Image: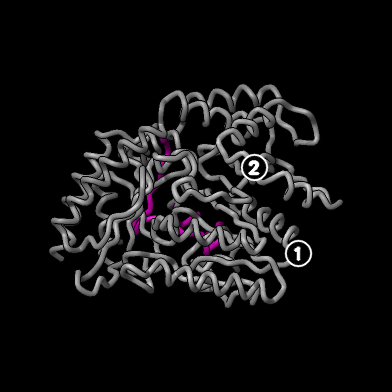
């Protein structure tokens, strides 16, 4: 029986597969993946393997620590302390207490608990198109999920505001940010009038929402509004943190905001299940209300050793600078492609977190998910892995391991040129 048929028989039918003809991968090395037939693919989309697939330093430290000790955090261990200190040192001074988990969903769920424990209510402001995780508490604050198939109306304590998308948002023009902020302010003030402190959770660069950098003038002012009302700001850095955007180590620095809670995950373990919540001493102390927080595997010695090694590799191999340089080059060349093909509506993002919005017609900027899907599937046949996302599923995501080099970028650009040319003629 073919592996796909076995999978369909014994795994949940709600689990998706990428591509019309799914890949059977057996090996990864650096920025490349290999299928069962030995075909090599340039991985331009798997942002979890941040410093490259099967990095020898990570494999070595995982093996060595696993041979020595792996247990829970009810015992003293240097690994988790060294790692926590390294993370804290990279963040604003007020963020000084770490909680460790195993996934981004766990971290965002815990961040909500911490915020709601302090605010004494559940009122949460979210941005349309946002995705924060798969637990029930996160589905209900993720418009990306609850507005889709199988979704449901969010509870009354979830307050959705429009995405400040300067390309195809609800508002355009010079005063658009003011209009987005007016809506945001109205929601925040209404929560306050009702006698509650608001919580605001955001992605500084929206991933599933369509690779959208939140405008600095919007996010900075939105966070100020929340803080002026005594509320709490949560920065979900799970998709964009750790040097991916190049200019800054964490995405929220790009908009010059100062969150009260930061959640990180995905790439911090380079494929190993690892995530974290970092908050202020005040919020952590308030959360220490008698109910113990315990996580069987969060912050275990093996995970902590891997996380610390990922940070060392980023520093030793100067990968944040690489993300900036290669990302800038790639974005410049993609903008040149945009001049050639009317099917490309927008190029956006920073560093190695970029999006290509595919449209049907330049005057109406109607989304073209069919063409985006064709491009991604044809790119796979040419040896490049990409994916689509966004509310209309028409945004091609580029978020490779940050070891991506100029040769990789040129290969990607060459294949994109050929593929978009082909799809444009159909």
Most extreme residue toward the front, as rendered? 228
Which residue position holds label 2? 94
**Residue 20 belongs to magenta span:** yes
- Residue 304's place in the image compared with 17, above or below, is above
| Dot 1 alpha-carbon crowd within 10 angstroms: few under 14, some 14 to 19, many 20 or more | few
Which residue position holds label 1? 120
Residue at 52 percent across and 31 percent down: it is 310
Q: Quadrant of residue 198?
A: bottom right
* Segment tinted magenta in the rendering: 4-28
Nearer to us in this view, 103 or 322:
322
Residue 37, image x, y percentages:
33, 40
Q: State which tag comes first along the sequence, 2 or 1.
A: 2
- Quadrant location of the C terminus in the rendered image: bottom left
Residue 331, image x, y percentages:
27, 47
Horizontal relation, residue 69 to residue 369: left or right? right
Residue 109, image x, y percentages:
65, 56
Residue 305 has which mark?
Answer: none
As measured in the structure, the alpha-carbon distance from the residue carrying label 2 to the one carrying label 1 is 22 Å
- Describe the colour scheme in one phrase: one colour
- Residue 300's place in the image compared with 376, above or below, is above
Residue 17 visible? The answer is no
Q: Quadrant of residue 248?
A: top left
Residue at 47 percent across and 25 percent down: it is 56
């Amino acid at each position: 029986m073919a592996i796909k048929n076995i999978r369909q028989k014994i795994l949940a039918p709600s689990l998706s597969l990428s591509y019309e003809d799914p890949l059977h991968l057996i090996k990864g090395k650096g920025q490349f993946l290999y299928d069962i037939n030995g075909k090599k693919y340039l991985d331009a989309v798997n942002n979890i393997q941040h410093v490259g697939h099967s990095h020898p330093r990570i494999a070595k430290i995982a093996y060595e620590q696993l041979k020595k000790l792996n247990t829970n955090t009810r015992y003293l261990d240097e690994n988790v302390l060294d790692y926590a200190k390294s993370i804290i040192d990279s963040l604003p001074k007020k963020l000084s207490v770490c909680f460790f988990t195993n996934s981004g969903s766990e971290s965002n769920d815990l961040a909500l608990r911490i915020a709601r424990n302090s605010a004494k209510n559940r009122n949460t402001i979210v941005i349309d198109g946002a995705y924060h995780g798969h637990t029930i508490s996160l589905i209900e604050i993720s418009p990306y999920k609850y507005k889709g198939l199988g979704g449901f109306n969010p509870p009354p304590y979830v307050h959705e505001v429009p995405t400040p998308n300067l390309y195809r948002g609800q508002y355009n023009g010079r005063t658009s940010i003011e209009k987005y902020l007016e809506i945001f302010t109205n929601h925040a003030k209404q929560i306050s009038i009702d006698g509650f402190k608001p919580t605001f959770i955001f992605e500084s660069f929206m991933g599933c929402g369509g690779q959208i950098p939140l405008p600095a003038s919007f996010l900075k002012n939105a966070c100020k509004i929340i803080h002026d009302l005594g509320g709490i700001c949560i920065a979900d850095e799970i998709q964009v943190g750790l040097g991916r955007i190049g200019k800054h180590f964490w995405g929220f620095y790009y908009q010059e905001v100062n969150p009260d809670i930061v959640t990180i995950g995905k790439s911090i373990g380079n494929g190993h299940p690892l995530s974290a919540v970092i908050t202020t001493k005040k919020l952590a102390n308030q959360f220490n209300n008698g109910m113990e927080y315990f996580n069987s595997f969060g912050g275990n010695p093996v995970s902590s050793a891997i996380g610390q090694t990922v940070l060392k590799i980023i520093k030793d191999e100067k990968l944040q600078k690489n993300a900036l340089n290669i990302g800038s080059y790639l974005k410049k060349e993609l903008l040149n492609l945009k001049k050639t093909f009317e099917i490309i509506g927008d190029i956006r993002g920073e560093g190695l977190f970029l999006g290509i919005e595919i449209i049907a017609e330049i005057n109406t900027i109607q989304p073209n998910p069919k063409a985006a899907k064709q491009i991604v599937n044809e790119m796979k046949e040419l040896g490049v892995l990409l994916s689509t996302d966004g509310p209309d599923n028409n945004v091609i995501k580029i978020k490779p391991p940050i070891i991506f080099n100029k040769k990789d970028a040129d290969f990607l650009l060459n294949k994109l040129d050929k593929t978009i040319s082909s799809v444009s003629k159909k």
